[in-house]
Image (spheres, rainbow, N blue to C red):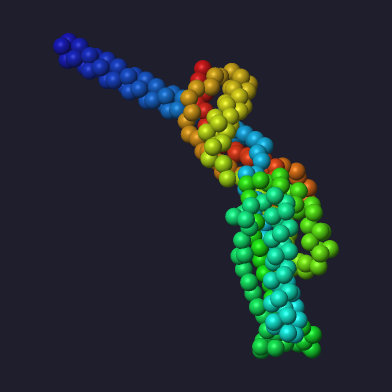
Amino acid sequence: MPNSVFGFAAALVLAIGVALAGWFVGDGFFQGRKADRYVTVKGVAEQEVKADLAVWALRFVATGNDLTEVQRKIAADAVLARDFLLASGFAETEVENSDLQVTDRLAQEYQPGQVDSRFIIAQTLTLRSADVDAVAATLARLSELVSAGLVLSNENQWNSGPTYIFSRLNDLKPAMIAEATENARAGAEQFAADSGSGVGTIRRASQGVFQILPRDRFPNAREAKQVHKRVRVVSTIEFMLQD
C-alpha cells in the first residue's frame, strides 16, 4: 500500500510539473507574439522655402590675332559687366573677378583647320548675393549686356543662369521630423483601427533623407535654378500595436 501511494504521489507531481512547463512555454510564446505585433508606416512632411543666396558666374570672351587688342577688349568687357551689376543695385563686395583664361590656338599641338582668331581670352565675374529677387530681376535684363557687345560664353554651362541656394535646412529639421512622425502615427492608427488594435510606442524609427526639390515640376526642372523650392522628408516608423 505505501508503495502504491508513493507511486501515485510521484505521478501527480510529474503531471503538475509537465502542466506548469507547458503553461510557461505557452505564455512565453504568447508574450513573444505580442512583441511581434507592430506596424510599419511612412510619414511625409513637406515645406515650401525660398532661396537665401544666389551665386552667378558671368563668363565672357574676346578673340583676335593681336594679344594686346584682345586684352584691351576683355578688360573693357569686364568693366561693362561690373558696371551692369553695380547699376542693378549690387555692392562692390558682391562682385569679384574669379577666373581668367588665355588660349593661344597656334600653341596647341593639335589644331584642325585654319585658325581665324589666334588668341581667346575668357574672363569670369562672379556675383554672390543674398538678394535673390534682385539677382532674378537682373537675369531678366541680361540681353542688355549682349546688346552692348558683350560676348557671353556657355562653355561648361557657365552662363546657364544663377544658382539659387537654400542654406537654412537645419533650422527646419526638428519641426519637419515632428510633422512626419505625426503623419506616420495617423497612418498607423488607421491600420490599427482596421485590425481592432491600438497604437502604442515607437518600436523603431528611421528619419529618412531630407531633399530639396524644385517647387515647380516640369521636364528637366532643376532645383538649383529655382528661387522657390520644396523641402521634403520621408520617415519610416514602426509602432507597437496593443489591444
Q: Find residue 27 and report its horizontal and vertical position in percent.
A: 39, 22
Q: Residue at coordinates 44% horizontally, 24% vertically from top-left?
A: 30
183 left or right of 9 in image: right
Q: Find residue 175 and report its horizontal and vertical position in percent.
A: 55, 31
The residue sitting at the left extreme is: 2
Q: Find residue 211 and report its horizontal and vertical position in percent.
A: 61, 44
Q: Does 41 sit above or below residue 72?
A: above
- Quick one: 118 or 5, which is closer to the camera? 118
The residue sitting at the right extreme is: 147
Does the image show residue 214?
Answer: no
- Quick one: 195 or 82, which is closer to the camera? 82
195 left or right of 18 in image: right
111 left or right of 93 in image: right
Q: Find residue 172 and report its horizontal and vertical position in percent.
A: 56, 36
Q: Residue at coordinates 34% horizontally, 19% vertically from top-left?
A: 19
Q: Which image quadrant is residue 147 in? A: bottom right
Q: Does 124 sit above or below residue 238?
A: below
Q: Residue at coordinates 39% horizontally, 25% vertically from top-left?
A: 28
Does the image show residue 234?
Answer: yes
176 left or right of 224 in image: left
- Quick one: 99 or 44, which is closer to the camera? 99
Quadrant occupied by the N terminus:
top left
Q: Residue at coordinates 37% horizontally, 20% vertically from top-left?
A: 23
Q: Which image quadrant is residue 42 in? A: top right
Total marks drawn? 0
